[in-house]
Amino acid sequence: MATSTIHWSPGWTTKAPEQSDLVLALSGSGVLRPDNSWLQPLKSILGDAGSGGFVSLGSVDGRPVFVTEMPESLVAGQDVVPLRDALMMISDAPAAMLSTGFQVWQWFQDHKYCGRCGGGTGFHPRDRAKWCSRCSIPWYPRLAPCVIVVIRKEGRYLLAKSSHAKRHFYSLIAGFVEPGESLEAAVVREVKEETGLDVTNIRYQASQPWPFPHQLMAGFFADYAGGELVLQQDELADAGWFLPGSRPPVPPDTTISGRLIRDMERAISGGGIGF
């Protein structure tokens, strides 16, 4: 799997960008890729681009990086890559930087006003947060914890196709964690709700931020414990047990689902888990 040549270091500042600073320019659900690059100097952005503000993202090779949004009228004819395509189809995309950029920009847009009093907010003086001086409340970027799980049944594992999927991928059972619920309890509940199956021996494997719009995916392995496969029709179009090497198309290794599937295949084949 290729890796990005952009060496991004996450960070935060409330300072305004300077003309020589780098900008990640978003447009709708995509990111502008001028001259086959993901970043451009602020001085190259013309007109009213960036008039909605700038949010700090950190730095690349010591140069500050900010994210902003450009009106669609200013990017007509330019290369705008949908975020999902960048993360799933472009192996050398700077996934962490792009994901963070979309998430903090969404937070910046969603918290222009205080959720308690309705007054305008500014940047918190120290943290990456919006601050309401009237209520003395910080509004931090939202994170929604989700679980995603590979279920093993002897030498096979479960793959499912979402009812909402636009790509012909089979993937894994996943869902949001509910209030008062542990990650392991969420695995048990989501699997039962979507497939009718019971699982046991739940063990954590890895995590990945997923900016659609602000999930944090926690990945697990689990073993089949009983039940018949009964699909939740509004969530799953199809599901079945597959052997390593004889499965339908699955997401790439740039996603946690793709990595979990391939690690389970290695574990079944005797090659170890890989984490």
Image (spheres, rainbow, N blue to C red):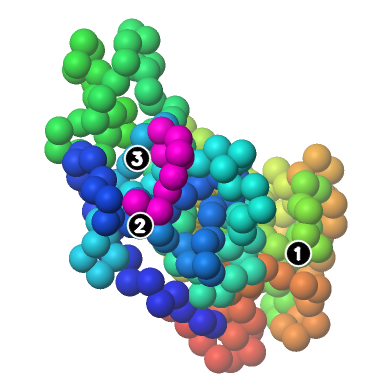
Residue at figure coordinates x 50%, y 41% from the top left: 70
Alpha carbon of mark 1 to alpha carbon of mark 3: how far? 38 Å
Residue type at mark 1? Tyr
User: According to the image, label 2 marks what residue?
Assistant: 41
In the image, residue 9 lies in the stretch drawn in magenta: no
The earlier-in-sequence mark between 1 and 3 is 3
Estimate how packed mark 1 is, as few (under 14), some (14 to 19) or many (20 or more) residues with alpha carbons within 10 Å: many
Image height check: is 27 above or below 98?
above
Q: Nearer the viewer, residue 267 or 145?
A: 145
User: According to the image, label 1 marks what residue?
Assistant: 170
Q: Which quadrant of the rendered structure holds the C terminus? A: bottom left
* Residue 263 image label: none
Residue 151 place in picture, x, y as percent: 65, 65
The earlier-in-sequence mark between 3 and 2 is 2
Residue at figure coordinates x 81%, y 63% from the top left: 168
For mark 3, give the secondary structure.
Answer: loop
User: According to the image, label 3 marks what residue?
Assistant: 54
